[in-house]
Image (tube, rainbow, N blue to C red):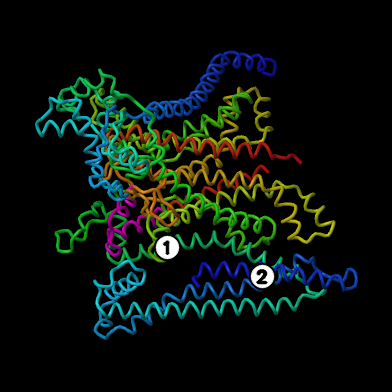
């Protein structure tokens, strides 16, 4: 028995070794595959977003020779700002388009022709005249804004070859558009409205600036509340609190709050801030309040970790030269822990910036055209703007949604990169 | 003075108090015998400033809280008796009219003479109240300032006073977390109670039909609506289950590969890349699920001869699973790395291959922690909102078929609370009942998961 057993064990091992190595390789391959699935999705994700979104940087415009007729803009010649503002500029743009197609005369045809132009064409002319009244009476060659249906067609997002009933642009309009294109009067120009305007029902006039400012105000409120509160809580729990039931309760509480679904915070905001305190709906102030309650646990947990990383020798040295406990914490420990706290705060802010579910509860989904000018005016936020546009039926909103997402992701990237740099720059090894 | 100006004045007064307190401390210290001054001059300044600001600010806050109620009471008392007899909600409208008139939002001509008189009375009362408040706050601030100023002596333990105040501030800050939890629970619970006064708890928890939209008019057939939440619970479980089917194997295997096989350099790049998935806002996943994944699945289903709904549970579940992958993988990575190297070395010493070691030694040792991670991930999936709002169905559907559209608890909360709402209808209150269920379920999951993870961590430390 004792003489046979080593050989047989060796045999058993030798017989199984090929199978076991195969299993080993298979297991390893499965692990790699799982990782690649995750990373592959990430790549696919960015590929589709950027692929869908980059066309939103450009907007179709039509070159027109516009006659800024004084008889239409300012019939009495007084150049009163009110008259200048309220004149019918769309008519001027229409007449310019009309001049290119003298053969179009019937009412229905004219209406079809005019619908190639965006309502924004008149707005642009209005701006030009209001800023510079001297141009009245001149004839100018301008690139005016085209309608979103034209834009979708020119960018190739909608096919020209499908039957007329499946197109938003009918055969007549397509004919005019082709005629304009052969004359080189249709071109893609940089879409500056996307970065400078608020929301709009017309995709060619819709922009993310309003939502960006709303998000900015919200983050401002969130930062102003959650950073001091979070740091103060962390200092108390880490440096001063006695170990007892009460502090245990606070700890458990904070850990739980970090995992409460965000929509529940929205319910709290609705019931408490709006219904009970009577704060205005859709205001960045309320959004900021709700988000700061959500961000608080993140900042507290990060700040406690930062405080914990400060070695006891620093504390003991401060106490040894006669500092009081408060002086020791505020003058020595806190400055050393500050980079870690700031890193945690930035990460918390980045999460708050991407959050949208609680904002739906407190009425920030409203359609708001104006760019907000204070934390109390109605506003929406970047992720909510994405949500709103994703629901819009117009094809032209698809590229804008993707572009808005890319902008949102860029903001998040910048914030997270700052956090990482901060950590790298100030990381100390004791 | 308006309260914001008054606040600025009080802050200014406190700064002044700091300056005076510090000056006096310096002056006192110069004449006092050496080393007889207890605190640094700055602390004396802070001491005087705190004494000056805190009572004044408390008074200001009290006034802010009680002024509106007092104003309302006195203005409504002055109204003619016929108007006072109005029911409460109409009286509230009248009061709003009065305030709009004062604010200049309504024209004087459109409202009656009673309202105009009341508006005038409101203005006088408010002005008087503001004048009194300003005077009281300033007098209090200055009196206490002078009192504290005169207390500045070498023996005054100013530092201890200031430090005590700071510590109280810290304690107050740490109570905000508790207050938030209480606030969440109370606000959701109170509204949910009002819901259960109208719909029985039993019907809500075990009813099979959910159609809150029927409760539009009181005289309509089925005006009470149907509030059986079982289809929502099953829908939530179906989508979360699908998400876990994606997230647990992929996340766990990624974690194992990263912690046991990957080279240091590969890990340094792959781990942060995978964690980017966790940083992407959920609304982006929702958009992706609705616009890219759902059509893909539908096309795929058509080619297989299957009928896939365009808002299928499968699409939402898949994308939610991808969102949760980094969550599972980084938590599991932590627990796997925490398994002591000695266990692995022992296993290698017995001749086991790496995968055998992982499956038979590391995985069982890490299992409690992994279970905790999965529980946390489940609570994440149940509470996830934007993906399902954008990619899952809106109508309640009691089915276990992942190719059909189902709705979830979070979708219904959003549906019920966006758009027009009246605050007493069971339709709106139902959202809070659902929120209460969501809160309690995730709370239990979190507590259990955190306990499991913590106990496991202590085991090897």
Return the x and y of residue A34 as percentages of the image width and height.
48, 27
Contact between marks 2 and 1 (CB within 8 A): the answer is no
- Above or below, comparing residue A354 to residue B131 in the picture: above
Discs 2/1, front: 2
Residue A334: x and y in percent read 70, 52
Find residue B70 and report its horizontal and vertical position in percent: 42, 79
Residue bounds of the magenta highlight: B411-438
Q: Secondary structure at mark 1?
A: helix
> What predominant SS class does the magenta segment belong to?
helix
Query: What residue lies at 54% left-to-right and 53% top-to-bottom?
Result: A296
**Viewport quadrant of the N terminus of chain A:** top right
Question: For this rendering, which residue is in front, B261 or A371?
Answer: A371
Q: Is residue A78 left or right of residue B260?
A: left
Task: Using the image, tell me which numbered label, if any, was put on residue B50.
Answer: 2
In the rendered image, residue B62 lying in the magenta stretch gets the answer no
- Seen as rendered, the residue at the extreme right is B34
Query: Can residue B331 be seen in this snapshot?
Result: no
Q: Which residue is mark 1?
A: A272
Which residue is the extreme one toward the front?
A: A77
**Is residue B48 among what the camera can see?**
yes
């Amino acid at each position: 028995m004792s003489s046979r057993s080593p050989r047989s064990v060796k045999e058993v091992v030798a017989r199984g070794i090929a199978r076991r190595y195969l299993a080993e390789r298979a297991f390893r391959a499965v692990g790699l595959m799982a990782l690649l699935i995750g990373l592959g999705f990430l790549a696919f994700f960015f590929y589709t977003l950027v692929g869908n979104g980059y066309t939103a940087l450009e907007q179709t415009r039509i070159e027109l020779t516009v006659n800024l007729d004084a008889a239409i803009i300012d019939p009495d010649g007084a150049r009163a700002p009110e008259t200048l503002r309220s004149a019918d500029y769309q008519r001027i743009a229409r007449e310019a388009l009309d001049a290119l197609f003298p053969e179009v005369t019937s009412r229905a045809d004219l209406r079809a022709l005019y619908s190639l132009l965006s309502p924004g064409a008149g707005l642009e002319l209005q701006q030009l005249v209001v800023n510079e009244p001297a141009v009245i009476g001149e004839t100018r060659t301008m690139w005016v804004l085209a309608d979103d249906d034209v834009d979708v067609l020119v960018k190739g997002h909608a096919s020209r070859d499908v039957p007329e009933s499946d197109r938003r642009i009918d055969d007549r309009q397509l004919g005019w558009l082709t005629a304009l294109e052969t004359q080189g009067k249709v071109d893609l120009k940089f879409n500056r409205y996307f970065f400078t305007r608020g929301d709009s029902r017309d995709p060619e006039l819709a922009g993310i600036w309003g939502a960006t400012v709303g998000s900015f105000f919200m983050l401002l409120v969130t930062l102003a509340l959650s950073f001091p509160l979070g740091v103060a809580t962390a200092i108390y729990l880490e440096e001063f609190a006695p170990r007892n039931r009460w502090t245990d309760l606070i700890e458990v509480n904070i850990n739980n709050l970090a995992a409460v679904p965000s929509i529940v915070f929205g319910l709290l905001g609705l019931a408490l801030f709006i219904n009970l305190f009577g704060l205005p709906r859709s205001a960045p102030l309320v959004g900021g309040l709700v988000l700061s309650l959500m961000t608080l646990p993140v900042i507290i947990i990060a700040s406690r970790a930062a405080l914990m990383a400060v070695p006891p020798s620093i504390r003991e040295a401060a106490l040894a030269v006669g500092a009081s406990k408060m002086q020791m914490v505020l003058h020595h420990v806190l400055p050393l822990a500050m980079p870690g706290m700031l890193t945690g705060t930035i990460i918390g802010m980045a999460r708050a910036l991407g959050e949208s579910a609680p904002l739906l509860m407190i009425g920030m989904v409203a359609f708001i055209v104006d760019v907000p000018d204070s934390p109390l005016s109605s506003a929406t936020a970047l992720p909510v703007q994405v949500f709103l546009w994703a629901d819009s039926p117009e094809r032209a909103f698809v590229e804008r949604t993707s572009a808005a997402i890319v902008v949102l992701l860029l903001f998040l990237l910048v914030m997270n990169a700052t956090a990482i740099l901060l950590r790298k720059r100030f990381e100390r090894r004791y | 003075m308006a309260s914001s100006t008054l606040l600025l004045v009080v802050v200014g007064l406190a700064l002044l108090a700091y300056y005076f307190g510090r000056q006096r401390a310096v002056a006192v210290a110069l004449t006092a015998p050496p080393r007889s001054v207890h605190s640094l001059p700055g602390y004396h300044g802070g001491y005087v400033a705190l004494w000056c600001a805190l009572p004044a600010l408390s008074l200001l806050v009290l006034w802010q809280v009680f002024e509106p109620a007092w104003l309302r009471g006195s203005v409504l008392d002055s109204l003619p008796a016929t108007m006072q007899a109005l029911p409460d909600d109409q009286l509230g409208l009248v009061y709003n009219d009065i305030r709009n008139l004062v604010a200049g939002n309504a024209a004087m001509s459109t409202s009656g003479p009673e309202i105009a008189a009341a508006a005038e009375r409101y203005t006088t009362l408010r002005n008087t109240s503001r004048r009194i408040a300003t005077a009281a706050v300033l007098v209090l601030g200055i009196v206490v300032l002078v009192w504290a100023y005169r207390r500045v002596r070498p023996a005054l333990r100013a530092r201890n006073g200031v430090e005590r105040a700071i510590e109280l501030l810290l304690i107050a800050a740490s109570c905000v977390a508790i207050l938030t939890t209480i606030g969440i629970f109370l606000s959701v619970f109170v509204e949910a109670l009002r819901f259960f006064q109208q719909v029985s708890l039993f019907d809500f928890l075990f009813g099979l039909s959910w159609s809150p939209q029927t409760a539009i008019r009181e005289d309509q057939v089925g005006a009470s609506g149907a509030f059986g939440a079982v289809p929502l619970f099953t829908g939530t479980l179906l989508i979360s289950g699908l998400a876990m089917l994606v997230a647990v194997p992929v996340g766990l295997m990624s974690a194992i590969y990263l912690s046991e096989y990957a080279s240091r350099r590969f890990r340094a790049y792959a781990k942060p890349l995978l964690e980017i998935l966790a940083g992407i806002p959920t609304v982006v996943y929702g958009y992706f699920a609705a616009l890219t994944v759902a059509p893909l699945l539908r096309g795929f289903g058509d080619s297989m001869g299957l009928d896939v709904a365009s808002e299928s549970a499968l699409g939402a579940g898949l994308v939610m699973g991808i969102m949760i992958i980094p969550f599972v993988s980084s938590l599991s990575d932590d627990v796997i790395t925490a398994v002591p190297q000695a266990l692995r070395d022992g296993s290698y010493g017995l001749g086991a291959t790496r995968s055998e070691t992982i499956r038979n030694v590391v995985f069982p040792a890490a299992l409690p922690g992994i279970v905790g991670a999965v529980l946390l991930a489940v609570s994440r999936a149940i509470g996830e909102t934007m993906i399902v709002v954008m990619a899952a169905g809106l109508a309640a559907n009691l089915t276990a078929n992942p190719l059909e559209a189902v709705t979830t608890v979070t979708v219904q909360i959003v549906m019920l609370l966006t758009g027009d709402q009246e605050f007493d209808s069971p339709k709106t209150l139902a959202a809070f009942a659902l929120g209460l269920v969501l809160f309690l379920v995730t709370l239990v999951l979190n507590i259990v998961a955190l306990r499991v993870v913590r106990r496991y961590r202590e085991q090897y430390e």
